[in-house]
């Protein structure tokens, strides 16, 4: 079996006496788009928060590319290439799409080149950042939006910008809570097409929480299903979506 890119071992997160994540273990393989599903309140966001250093947890360990990152802070994880999209500062609405990408370049250093023009490295970094930004625009097929202010973008275009900004850091794995939340079906499909392309062509790993199972299921390689803080099924989408426990967990809350 290939080495997992992300491993969670016996993770428990309590809020008071309530275990929002209960002794959860899972392995995410490299080169995959993995979907985390589960009914409302099953612990998906809490798990993502624990993995990405936003929440302390009570028990368990997290490994990223084999390295124990259990107590790592969010910015340390970003430096290692684990990027949660909203951890990058939210888009600057008055800046253009291109400027928003440039600001995210090297976001992990805490000091963007845009705001430190006195730096001696500035000229070299500016060229590198510009090349990277145009490559990201090209990858996401939004080059024509480069000079549009972010406030003019649609919800779906903002979602693409969010992914683009993650790509401007040196992300190896991108974790997102609802990458295609509240956008139309065609746009959701476009976003997922880009995600699968980035995974196949650029070797990026994705771990995504998604409620749009109709759309997302066509684009995913591996699904992890949660209920009441535990993993109840994992495997290829066609298997997990047919799993009775998974179906029941969704019916219960309706
Ligand atoms: N800060 C908190 N304090 C207390 N309880 C919390 C806190 N955050 C989450 N919970 C509880 O933990 C459980 C899991 O919540 P979580 O937000 O992780 O679920 P989720 O699977 O992401 O749900 P959704 O699909 O609605 O986003 C819920 O019962 C929730 O009420
Ligand atoms: Mg959630």
Image: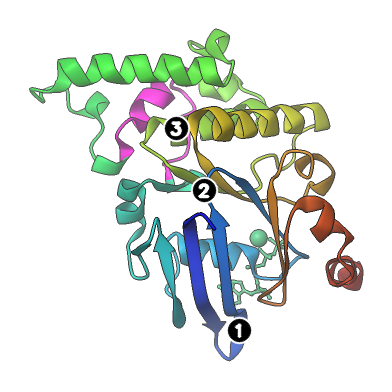
Q: Residue at x 44, y 32 (%)?
A: 167
| CA distance for labels 2 and 1 | 29 Å
Answer with mark 2 or mark 1, whichever residue precedes in sequence: 1
Q: Check whether the beta carbons of the residues at disc 2 and disc 1 lie within 8 A of each other.
A: no
Judged left or right of residue 215, residue 95 is left
Give the quadrant of residue 64: bottom left
Residue ranking furthest to the front? 1
> Taking the image as drawn, is residue 161 in sight?
yes
Residue under label 1: 19
Ligand 1 positioned in quadrant: bottom right
Which residue is at the front of the view, 14 or 235?
235
Circle 1: is it few (<14), some (14-19), or many (20+) Cα within 10 Å?
some
Answer with mark 2 or mark 3, whichever residue precedes in sequence: 2
Q: Which colour assignment does the render follow?
A: rainbow
Give the x, y percent position of residue 66: 38, 61
Q: Nearer the viewer, mark 2 or mark 3?
A: 2
Judged left or right of residue 92, residue 176 is right
Q: Nearer the viewer, mark 1 or mark 3?
A: 3
Give the x, y percent position of residue 217: 78, 45
Whether residue 90 is in magenta: the answer is: yes
Q: Quadrant of the C terminus?
A: bottom right
| CA distance for labels 1 and 3 | 34 Å
SS for callout 1: strand
> Taking the image as drawn, is residue 96 in sight?
no
Q: Residue at x 24, y 17 (%)?
A: 126
Give the x, y percent position of residue 88: 42, 42
Residue under label 3: 167
**Highlighted magenta segment, given as a residue range:** 88-107
Answer with mark 1 or mark 3, whichever residue precedes in sequence: 1
SS for callout 3: helix
Circle 3: is it few (<14), some (14-19), or many (20+) Cα within 10 Å?
many
Residue under label 2: 30
């Amino acid at each position: 079996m290939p080495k997992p890119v992300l491993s969670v071992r016996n993770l428990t997160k309590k809020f008071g006496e309530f275990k929002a994540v209960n002794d959860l273990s899972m392995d995410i393989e490299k080169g995959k788009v993995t979907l985390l599903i589960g009914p409302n309140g099953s612990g998906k966001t809490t798990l993502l928060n624990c993995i990405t250093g936003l929440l302390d947890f009570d028990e368990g360990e997290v490994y990223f590319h084999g390295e124990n990152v259990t107590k790592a802070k969010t910015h340390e994880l970003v430096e290692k290439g684990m990027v949660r999209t909203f951890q990058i500062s939210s888009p600057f609405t008055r800046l253009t799409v291109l400027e928003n990408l440039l600001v995210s370049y090297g976001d992990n250093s805490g000091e963007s080149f845009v705001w430190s023009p006195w730096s001696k490295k500035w000229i070299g970094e500016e060229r590198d950042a510009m090349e990277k930004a145009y490559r990201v625009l090209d990858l996401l097929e939004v080059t024509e939006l480069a000079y549009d202010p972010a406030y003019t973008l649609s919800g779906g275009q903002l979602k693409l910008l969010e992914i683009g900004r993650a790509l401007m850091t040196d992300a190896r794995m991108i974790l997102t809570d609802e990458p295609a939340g509240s956008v139309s079906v065609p746009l959701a499909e476009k976003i997922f097409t880009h995600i699968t392309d980035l995974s196949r062509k650029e070797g990026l790993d994705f771990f995504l929480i998604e409620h749009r199972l109709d759309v997302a299921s066509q684009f995913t390689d591996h699904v992890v299903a949660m209920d009441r803080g535990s993993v109840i099924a994992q495997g290829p989408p066609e298997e997990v979506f047919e799993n009775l426990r998974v179906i029941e967990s969704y019916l219960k809350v309706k």
